[in-house]
Amino acid sequence: MKRSSPMALVVSNSTPDDKGADASFISLRDAGKIYQTRTGKVVAVEAASFDLARGETLALLGPSGCGKSTLLMMIAGLLEASSGRILVNGRPLVGPIPELGFVFQRDLLLDWRSVLDNVLLPYALVGQDPKAHVDRARSLLNRVGLGGFEDKRPYELSGGMRQRVAICRALIDDPDIFLLDEPFAALDAFTREQMQLDMQRLSLEKPRTTILVTHEIPEAVFMADRIAIMTARPSQIREIVDIDLPWPRNMKTRESEAFARYVTKIHGMFANLGVIHG
Ligand SMILES: Nc1ncnc2c1ncn2[C@@H]1O[C@H](COP(=O)(O)OP(=O)(O)OP(=O)(O)O)[C@@H](O)[C@H]1O
C-alpha cells in the first residue's frame, strides 16, 4: 500500500517549478555544509543530492558524526547550505520552513508547563491564543495513548511518554513536512519498537513528507520508503535504497525474509564502506 499525499506548501516567492514537483517535493542538488571553526574548516556534508516525493518517508542512515543532523537542519532551513541548492515544492529554500514539524533526540519539554500546554507551546511562542487548538491537542494525545495525562507535568512521565508529547507538539499545526532527528535514540528497545508502530499509525492517518535521522538499520528499514546510505565524514549520500515492503508494517514485517534481506544488504553496504569492521 502506497501512502497518499499531503497538501501543497509555499516556501519562497520565486517561480515554482511545478513540473514534477510532486515527485520532487524536497530536492537536494549537491547541497554541502562546511563549518568554520577556530581550528579550521569542518566539511560536515559533501554534495548531497536526492529527490523526495510528497508523503514519502526517507531515512538518513549513517555512522555517528557523518552529518545526518547537519543535513536535517539544512533541509529545515535552520542552517544555510555552504554550497548547492535545496528546493521545497520546486522553490529554493530561503529560510526556516514555516510549516514544519521537528522532533529532536531530546524531547525539550518545559517541566513547569502541563503536558497539554507543552503540546500547545508553538502557539504561545508566536503570541497566538492556543484555545482554538485544545481539541486537536487532546485528540493527538489520545492517539498516542496519552489521554488522561493532559494535566501531568513532563517530569511525571517516562522517557517514551515524554517523546510522545514532543511528537504531538511537532504535529499540532498539522505540518506538511515532518523531520525527526533520532527521536527514539534515548529509549529502551521495547519502547522504541512501540514508538515506531505509533509513528507509523500517525503517518498512515495523515501522510506527511518525512525525513528520519537514525543510525539503526532495522529502524530505517521498518520506518522508511527509502533509505539514504551516508558515508563517514565528510559525508556523502552513497546510495538510495528503496524499501519495497507493504504498508502497514507490523511484527510480521520484522519477522519476514524480505525485511531480513534489506537489513543484511544495508549492513553489507556499510561493511564495504569500512563503517563496520570485524
Ligand atoms: N556547529 C558546529 N561547528 C563545527 N562543527 C560541527 C558543528 N556541528 C556539527 N559539527 C561537526 O560536523 C560533523 C557532523 O555532525 P552532525 O551532528 O551533523 O553528525 P551526525 O551524523 O548527526 O552525528 P550523530 O549521529 O553522532 O548525532 C561532525 O564532525 C561534527 O563534529
Image: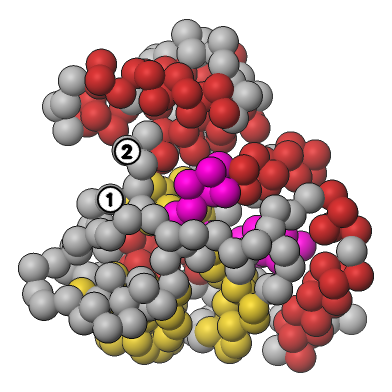
Per the image, label 2 sits on a secondary structure element best described as: loop
Q: Quadrant of residue 169?
A: top left
Q: Residue at x 28, y 70 (%)?
A: 89
- Assess whether mark 2 and mark 1 are in contact (beta carbons under 8 angstroms): yes
Task: Identify the mark nearer the N-term, 1 or 2.
Answer: 1
Give me the residue at 43% from left, 60% from top.
Answer: 5
Q: CA distance from mark 1 to mark 2?
A: 8 Å
- Relative depth, front residue between 160 and 120: 120
Q: Is residue 149 left or right of residue 243?
A: left
User: Can you say whether 169 is above or below 88 in the image?
Assistant: above
Residue at numbered disc 2: 173
Residue 249: give x, y in percent of width and height: 74, 54
Helix, strand or loop status at disc 1: loop
Neighbour tally class for label 2: few under 14, some 14-19, many 20 plus, Cα within 10 Å: some
Residue corresponding to mark 1: 99
Q: Is residue 96 visible?
A: yes
